[in-house]
Image (spheres, grey):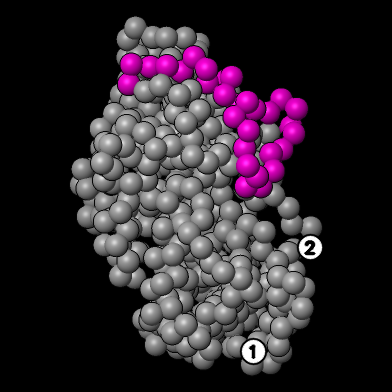
Amino acid sequence: MEVAIIGGGIAGLSLAINLHQRGIPCHVYESIPDPKELGVGLTLLPHGMRELTRLGVAGALQAVGGEIRESLFFNRFGQLAYKEPRGRQAGYEYPEVSISRGVLHMALYQAARMQLGAGRITTDCHCVAVEQEDGGVTLRMRTSSGAMREPARADVAIACDGIHSAVRKQFYPDDRVVYAGINSWRGVTRQKPVLDGKSWIRIGSMRRGAMVIYPIEGKLDAQGNQLVNWIAWLQSDSMQRNDWNKQGRLEDFLPYYADWKFDWADVPEMLRRADVILELPLVDKDPLDRWTFGRVTLAGDAAHPMYPRGSNGAAQALIDVRTLAELLANGGDPAAALKAYEEARLGPTSAVVRTNRNSPPDFINMKVEELTGDRPFQNLDDYITQDELRALSERYKRIAGFGLKDLR
């Protein structure tokens, strides 16, 4: 059996390594001509690190990434509402690691090239159509210059081509992203560590301006600085949507955070000193009722793009592709394996998409803001207890598949 993997991002490369480990030949077709270390930060939750450990790349990521030991929730006045241990500090077998997306991507890219052989990854291949016939599939692809490539044949095709998936569009011509009026800006700043330099911090809520801050380097440089990733979210009254990965303008969002100067962090100064700022809308897509069409299926963001509010997109993609590889390795009809994969993963990922919309982890901040009237508090227990806030956090972990009991 030969598997065609459309897209050489995190999902596609992880699928390739999973298949190779199980003795299944595959070929990755990536649209970018020359993959490079690009992007800002992401967080690998314990269930994501479990999958990367199985792929043999977790050690390299831990050596350069920032291990998250605690998660903290602050209101927009800088007051701590709730905190909890994370990763190994919370009793998990696997750590929680924040890292540059580009570092993760290139670690998987190099591992796939080494294990599969460089000839099994072809770049500058944008898939425009997948055709099926008895016993196989044919990929129609073009280069970045628009020239058509020779068609590629395989027994099955797995679309790992992201939120703008051309393959998904083929089966769902009216497919579009869902925009709820929230824009975001992402950036990285080299500075002194925030708090202990091992914390994942949420401040405020979408209603008045929200922010997430976390390190994406574990070690400090010679000046005692660390690379810090941040994301700013703002509700757009005009419903005007940001562009995709366009260079962001500080003046578009800095005024909303101008007074966020706390005794533990100077947020406006961090924003002003950013090395890079990108703008993009906060979007996802409605869950589908079907991913698999004969010998073609969807995986990762092509199947279930979700809001990045729970740091769960990478982990869910990694679980997708390991599940898919296991089912294909069982032998038998590959189309039946693709359908079994859909049955195993569509329900859980749809639940995460919906939860990220309605009650994501930052729902804790939203609840505190609502109960306190968006004012500083003297004693938060007068409004809501720590046990009640902990229950909100644990509920999200269970739905997302990384409750402590789920990973034991």
Residue at point 57%, 20% (across, down): 256
Residue at point 34%, 7% (across, down): 378
Q: Position of residue 248 (x, y in %)?
A: 62, 37
The mark found on residue 197 in the picture is: none
286 falls in the magenta region: no
Q: Which residues are magenta?
A: 235-264
Disc 2 element: loop
Give the quadrant of residue 325: bottom left
Give the quadrant of residue 21: bottom left
Residue at point 58%, 42% (across, down): 278
Q: Is residue 104 above or below residue 377?
A: below
Q: Nearer the viewer, residue 102 or 169?
A: 102
Disc nearest the viewer among 2 and 1:
1
- The C terminus lies in which quarter of the figure? bottom left
Tell me if I can see residue 394 in this picture.
Answer: no
Q: Where does label 1 land, which residue?
A: 153
Neighbour tally class for label 2: few under 14, some 14-19, many 20 plus, Cα within 10 Å: few
From this viewpoint, which residue is outermost toward the front? Answer: 222
Q: Nearer the viewer, residue 143 or 297?
A: 143
- Label 2 is placed on what type of residue? Pro
Q: Position of residue 394 (x, y in %)?
A: 35, 39
Q: Position of residue 356 (x, y in %)?
A: 52, 42
Name which of mark 2 and mark 1 comes first in the sequence: 1
Disc 1 element: strand
- Label 1 is placed on what type of residue? Arg
Q: Is residue 362 above or below residue 269?
A: below
Neighbour tally class for label 1: few under 14, some 14-19, many 20 plus, Cα within 10 Å: some
Q: Position of residue 142 (x, y in %)?
A: 73, 76
Residue at point 47%, 9% (across, down): 375
Side of 38 where 214 appears, left or right = left
The mark found on residue 173 in the picture is: 2
